[in-house]
């Protein structure tokens, strides 16, 4: 057992920031002496004194032998991994590295169609061929959940030469599928199960939270420590266990997708966040769950609103558990879209959600929230339901069903081939049945509706236009106004 009270990287950074010396190395502001006064006024000088580079005492992220190695070993023990890598380019680079380390050009990888755009980037970088599975769909809520074990089993029977399976656990809504069963099926083919666990870094620290991906049998998992725990934005971790993943390949892949000038502020925040959770995680998560339960109970009693809960008769293969710290409120009963409610809450009540969709708003309740936050959230919804309720409009859409339970997404070539193909830009009205050459997704949550190599169809175009018309943002593509799309030139 390691001493989880230690913070080797944070301690080394603190000591170097305080050491009097003449700095003739990057960054150019030289511990804040040359920083803009406007930045100094906002952040203070202390943070810039700690904005250091790869000094001898601070180790090297890509060949760690000192304090970074020690900090990563402590994190591996705390999160239940065999080996852990610190990430400064977010979970995005971790997902990309996971695919690069397990798949080469022409190799097949099985994954859900509602993956994050980082997985599509991994396909483009690696040249891997995606075998997409449609996630389980809830028509009552118009929400896509997780892929099912049966879908994975069927895909592996049809594609026994696949090199890996990747899944999302939990979804952006906090829904967890049957990961243990998926792991068992995947391992029957002696291939690794990769997990995008960006929103589940807290699972290891409380028994009332869903089973962590590693404990469920995943070979590799990527976690955004900044999303739900106490690290700085972009600070994430990649964990592996078992012998199906080559750690050296992970290290080499990360060298391709991470900055060669990593921020030690981000790295030290990972060290500190790990210590915080290792020592106080259960207490912090108990308090967070209590706040979430209070919000869920009170909001569910407001007329016109409902909250996402575990099915009363037990879960389905695509919905086996729910992260109770993730609060999804269905607002369509108010005759308003999620986008409209999001704007009202933000502008009128100073309550800001994580993301909005056509019928829902989703809120992340974490160790940083307070009782006052919950009170403000509940009061905002209470007032909104009284003052903005429209009885003459019904918001009901099953566009997710059209997109992810039908064959809208025919892949004509690999994402890599389409991405690097000669392309042209056409008006949106002339792109039907053409091959897409860019990533197009409403953001957040960053799930691509179109990706390079897919045939553009009318249901997809209708969906994007409706999302935009109702206030959603389209990202990833060159023309965010969606008047044009980039397609493979014929």
Image (spheres, helix red, strand yellow):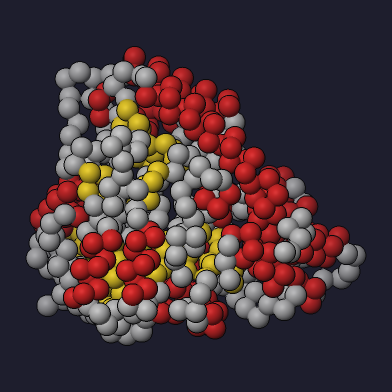
> Where residue 231 sits in the image (x, y, percent)?
62, 53
Q: Quadrant of residue 183?
A: bottom left
Q: Quadrant of the N terminus?
A: bottom right
> Where residue 139 sits in the image (x, y, percent)?
19, 42
Q: Quadrant of the C terminus?
A: bottom left
Q: Quadrant of residue 117?
A: bottom left
As drawn, 25 above or below 221: below
Horizontal side, residue 261 vs residue 387: left or right: right
The residue at the point 25 percent across, 73 percent down is: 156
State how many labels appear: 0
As drawn, 420 above or below 240: below
Can residue 114 be seen? yes
The residue at the point 40 percent across, 56 percent down is: 169
The one nearer the camera, 197 or 230, is 197
As drawn, 189 above or below 397: below
Can residue 423 be seen? no
> Where residue 103 sits in the image (x, y, percent)?
37, 81
Horizontal side, residue 456 vs residue 184: left or right: left
The one nearer the camera, 484 or 337, is 337
> Where residue 279 sits in the image (x, y, percent)?
70, 49
The residue at the point 53 percent across, 31 percent down is: 291
Horizontal side, residue 400 vs residue 446: left or right: left
The residue at the point 52 percent across, 57 percent down is: 224
As drawn, 472 above or below 98: above
For this orientation, the residue located farthest to the top is 386
Horizontal side, residue 2 vs residue 411: left or right: right
């Amino acid at each position: 057992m390691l001493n989880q009270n230690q913070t080797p990287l944070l301690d080394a950074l603190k000591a170097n920031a305080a050491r009097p010396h003449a700095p003739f190395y990057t960054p150019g502001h030289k511990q804040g002496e040359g920083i803009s006064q406007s930045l100094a006024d906002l952040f203070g000088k202390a943070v810039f004194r700690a904005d250091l580079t790869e000094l001898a005492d601070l180790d090297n992220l890509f060949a760690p032998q000192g304090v970074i190695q020690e900090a990563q070993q402590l994190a591996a023990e705390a999160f239940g991994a065999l080996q852990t890598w610190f990430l400064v380019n977010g979970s995005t680079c971790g997902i990309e590295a996971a695919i690069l380390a397990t798949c080469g050009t022409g190799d097949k990888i099985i994954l859900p169609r509602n993956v994050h755009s980082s997985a599509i980037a991994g396909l483009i970088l690696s040249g891997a061929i995606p075998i997409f599975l449609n996630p389980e769909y809830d028509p009552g809520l118009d929400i896509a959940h997780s892929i099912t074990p049966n879908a994975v089993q069927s895909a592996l029977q049809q594609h026994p030469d696949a090199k890996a399976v990747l899944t999302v656990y939990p979804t952006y809504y906090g829904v967890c599928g049957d990961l243990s069963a998926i792991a068992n099926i995947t391992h029957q083919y002696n291939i690794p199960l990769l997990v995008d666990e960006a929103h589940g870094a807290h699972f290891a620290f409380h028994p009332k939270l869903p089973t962590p991906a590693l404990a469920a049998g995943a070979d590799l998992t990527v976690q955004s420590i900044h999303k739900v725990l106490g690290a700085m934005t972009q600070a994430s971790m990649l964990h592996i266990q078992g012998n199906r993943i080559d750690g050296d390949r992970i290290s080499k892949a990360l060298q391709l997708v991470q900055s060669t000038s990593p921020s030690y502020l981000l790295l030290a925040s990972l060290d500190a966040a790990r210590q915080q959770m290792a020592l106080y995680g259960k207490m912090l998560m108990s308090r967070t769950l209590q706040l979430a339960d209070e919000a869920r109970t009170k909001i569910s009693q407001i007329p016109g609103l409902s909250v996402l809960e575990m099915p009363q008769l037990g879960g389905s293969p695509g919905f086996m558990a729910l992260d109770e710290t993730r609060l999804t409120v269905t607002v369509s009963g108010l005759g308003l879209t999620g986008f409209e409610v999001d704007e009202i809450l933000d502008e009128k009540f100073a309550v800001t959600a994580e993301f909005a969709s056509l019928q829902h708003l989703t809120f992340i309740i974490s160790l940083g929230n307070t009782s006052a936050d919950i009170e403000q959230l509940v009061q905002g919804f209470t007032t909104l339901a009284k003052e903005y309720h429209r009885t003459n409009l019904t918001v009901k859409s099953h566009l997710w069903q059209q997109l992810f339970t039908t064959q809208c997404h025919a892949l004509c070539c690999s994402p890599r081939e389409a991405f690097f193909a000669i392309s042209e830009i056409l008006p949106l009205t002339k792109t039907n049945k053409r091959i897409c050459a860019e990533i197009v997704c409403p953001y957040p949550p960053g799930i691509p509706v179109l990706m390079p190599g897919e045939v553009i169809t009318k249901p997809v175009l209708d969906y994007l236009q409706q999302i935009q018309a109702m206030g959603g943002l389209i990202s990833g593509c060159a023309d965010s106004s969606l008047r044009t799309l980039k397609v493979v030139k014929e």
